Image (tube, rainbow, N blue to C red):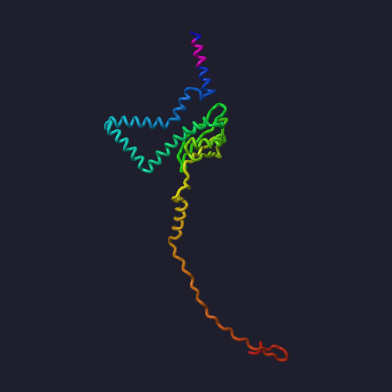
Amino acid sequence: MAKSIRRARGARRIDVMEFWHAPKQHWFVVGLGVLLRWRAEIFLTAVFLVGMAWLYHQVGEGYAWLIFTGTVVVVVLVPQSRWFVFSRFWCLVDRHRLRTCLRQARARTMNLDGALPFMLWARPTKTGERIWLWSRAGSSAGDLEAVLEYIAPACYARDARVRRVRKLSTLFAVEVIRRDPLDRSTPIDSPLAKVASLVRKSRSEGTEPIAAATVTPLPVQDKPAPKPAAVVHGEDLSDYID
């Protein structure tokens, strides 16, 4: 009995030490990491199952699938909702594909302990997606710059870049370039053009157009001819004679 108690205590000590020194190998941390990586998929699946079960109970199976199909059609046809759904879909794809690429890349992308950077979140941008990462001890953003040529094809994109944060070197982002706004035939609306038009409009209000100045010619008076000088014995006396 005493030996079994000692063995149980020894197993607990080993379990605690494993969690303290190598947390990524512990079953609790591994399960938590899986839940965090698949949190969006788990949430959407739960919402779908709960919503369909509620519709089954309210309107029946046929109408439930009809409502679901109509909702999908409306989301696809409306441009705003379609862009929202597609952009979030690519964010999910980029997170999983980036993790797979960092594990399979030839260059070193993890520390000596075999840990990859933490993938915090992904957000859509005008050119693609931006994935924020937190580097662990022994790794940096420079490790990912060596595998950018692998990240772009892994995420089905045209290019990939690393965006650093000057105030905190531990935090950085991977820019997945999927489209180029300048590579379009239609002109791009710039907010500066709208601001310039508003400034011109505000300046033109309350002012009258400036008319051209009229030039009036002044009359030119002829100067009188100078009087001849009166010279007497070689002296000029014209100043004393009117």
Q: Is residue 45 visible?
A: yes
What residue occupies the far left of the structure in this picture? 59
- Answer with left or right where residue 113 lies relative to residue 89: right
Q: Is residue 169 visible?
A: no
Q: Viewer-proximal residue, 152 or 84?
A: 152
Total residue callouts: 0
Q: Is residue 5 magenta?
A: yes
In the image, residue 90 sits, relative to residue 19, either above or below, namely below
Residue 192 position, x and y percent, is 47, 52
Residue 190 position, x and y percent, is 46, 50
Residue at (35% x, 32% y) in the render: 48
Q: Viewer-proximal residue, 139 or 63?
A: 63
In the image, residue 241 sits, relative to residue 210, either above or below, namely below
Q: Is residue 43 magenta?
A: no
Residue 30 position, x and y percent, is 48, 25
Q: Viewer-proximal residue, 50 or 236?
A: 50
Residue range of the region highlighted in magenta in the rendering: 4-11
What residue occupies the far top of the structure in this picture? 1
In the image, residue 17 sits, relative to residue 168, either above or below, namely above
Residue at (67% x, 90% y) in the render: 230
